[in-house]
Image (tube, rainbow, N blue to C red):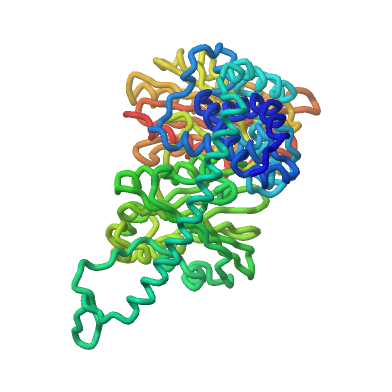
Amino acid sequence: MPDPADFDELYHASRRRLVLQAFALTGDLGLAGTAVRDAFVAARQHWRKVRRLPDPEGWVRARSWTVAQRRGAAHVLPRVRHRDRDLDPSQRTVVDALQGLTEVQRRTLLLNHLAAVSLPQIAREVGQGRERTEEHLQHATAAMAVALDTDSASIRSRLEQLAPAAGRVRLPRVTAVHRDGVRRHRRRVALVAALVVAVAAAAGAVVQQQWRPPTTATTTGGHVGRSSAPASRPVSRAMLLPATELARVAPRNDWAVWSTTDNTGGSGLNSDCQAARFADPHGLGAFVRTFAATGSPHRHAVQTVEVSRSDRAAGRAFGTVVGWYAGCSGTRTQLLAAYRVPGVGDEARELVLRLPGHRSYAVGVARTGAVTTATVVETRGGSALSPDRTAAGLATSVDRLCAADEAGRCVSGQPRAHRTLPPPSGDVPGMLAVVDLPFVGHVTRPWIGTAPAHARRNMAATPCDRTDFHRLGARRATTRTFLVPQAKLPPRFGLTETIGRFAGGARAAAALHQVESRMARCSHADHGASVHHASVVAHGRDGSSYASWRIDVEVTADRSVAYWTGVVRVGRYLAQVTFSPAPGRDISAADFRGLVERARDRLLELPG
């Protein structure tokens, strides 16, 4: 092994910088230090190759990030953050804000701000296209700006506030790294030599055994069967969906298998909403199969399969996968509908999502025993697959996997999709989430929601209703606002929701009736206001009631402002949702009614 004269220079020049990056990535100082140390030991072990690379520091960085995230996933979840009590409040705020991002958003942000990597190289490292990577960077930048209450230009300086904490990590001397790297290299050489000898010996044994008579076999009915225990039947590639089965789900397209992997390469993220490489980081294994299709509309698909160590662990993995799509925050996405599919495995759900660029996702997720599978079919320029077709494809996936020992019961009966409430978004229980919000005009930037706050004043009130939740008898009121940062929209553009909890259902119903009365009188009380597109549902799902209106208020002779507002009651809870559009950035009456109904669905998450 050559004695690298330039290894010392790399180690001393970059180790503190790499610890800062790993700390920002994981939020764990100890984990960052050990990951960087081990990455440098690996670099010393493979220095003959690493020294020839255009960017040796980039190799060490990628290795340290992989080690840090793998070891972080191996800890008992949820992990305890901020174990270093010396972090000051400002540093803790930065770490919390970073941990609020998805993995791919965090990696993209740190590569851009702390590693100074070009955008094309970031796209290659995170395994995304350039346009998609730009979206991740914009969303991460906007989310950090909101969380840190700063502007995007100050994010790098805020990240560098973690440098003093990273500087406290004790790293070994370069001589110790040399010693460990050389020792690993020598062990590797010895291991390879031993394997060569073992393989040669095993090959000779196999040749001799080929001619031995089958003493452990019995013959029955002309077939040969072993008298020992039956062979195990693990999940295999042969149990994944073939292209012919996918063609039955989407017959307008000609399908072909594009690739099949164990999902250990690249970023490990196979769709816009997937937040981590594996739903079960402690699982036994995984497969990912991608499909390409010709025909119209343009489609492609991906099937993922994860095998857990137990049914209970698979149940958690199932919930994680459903949560990725039910609370998709990695891109501008709207959850349109959710379904349950009884009779498919132990549990099965479907979700339909809308994405920018006239795209949609039909997502099917199922668990059978210790096996979790998901199929995502993306459609461009056409309608998403029907829920029943998605259910049929999900049933076929489970049926094929039921041949494995780890799988549970197979499909029973004809699978049918039944519309149901959306799964929890993982955001604020009882309140609208980003994934619930509709597309507005040609705005493709993601919505960002503020943290929920005590509503001293109802920010969702309009000039017509002037609803005050506390005066109406609410014991507690909470509000939050959604904006689209960096979209060059007027300041008044946005959406606000306020929810109030009343002493009982009768008090909440009386408050709703009072709002309806004020809206009915608005045009007579204020001649500059007009109210239209009124929709009132007195007896909705699960005893709910709700109403929505469009309000146009004339400000001057040639200028007016508009509002969409709606109120919904579920039990003792009352919510008001108000959207303030801008010229050319508006939604339809049907879209707003759908949003009010989704607010109703979210209220149903709260205890009665």
Judging depth in this view, the residue of 89 and 6 nearest the camera is 6
Tell me where residue 88 sits by quadrant.
top right
Considering only vertical position in the picture, is 499 above or below 246?
above
Residue 123 position within the rendered picture, expressed as x and y whole percent measured from the top left: 69, 45
Q: Is residue 95 left or right of residue 417?
A: right
Q: How many marks?
A: 0
Q: Given the current orientation, which residue lies at the most extreme bottom position? A: 222
Residue 525 shows in the view? no
In the picture, measured across the screen, residue 463 lies left or right of residue 505, that is right
- Where residue 381 sits, quadrant-wise, is bottom right
Q: Which is more toward the observer, 47 or 1?
A: 1
Residue 61 seen by the camera: yes
Q: Measured along the vertical axis of the image, is residue 133 above or below residue 198?
A: above
Quarter of the image that includes the N terminus:
top right
Quarter of the image where one finds residue 96 = top right
Residue located at (38% from left, 41% from top): 541
Q: Position of residue 161 (x, y in %)?
A: 65, 17
Quadrant holding the C terminus: top left
Task: Identify the residue shown where x is 33% and y is 55%.
Answer: 368
490 or 276, which lies in front? Answer: 276
Measured as percent of width and height from the top left, residue 511 is found at: 43, 22
Where residue 419 sits in the image (x, y, percent)? 41, 51
Residue at horizontal 74%, vertical 33%? 116
Above or below residue 338? Residue 605 is above
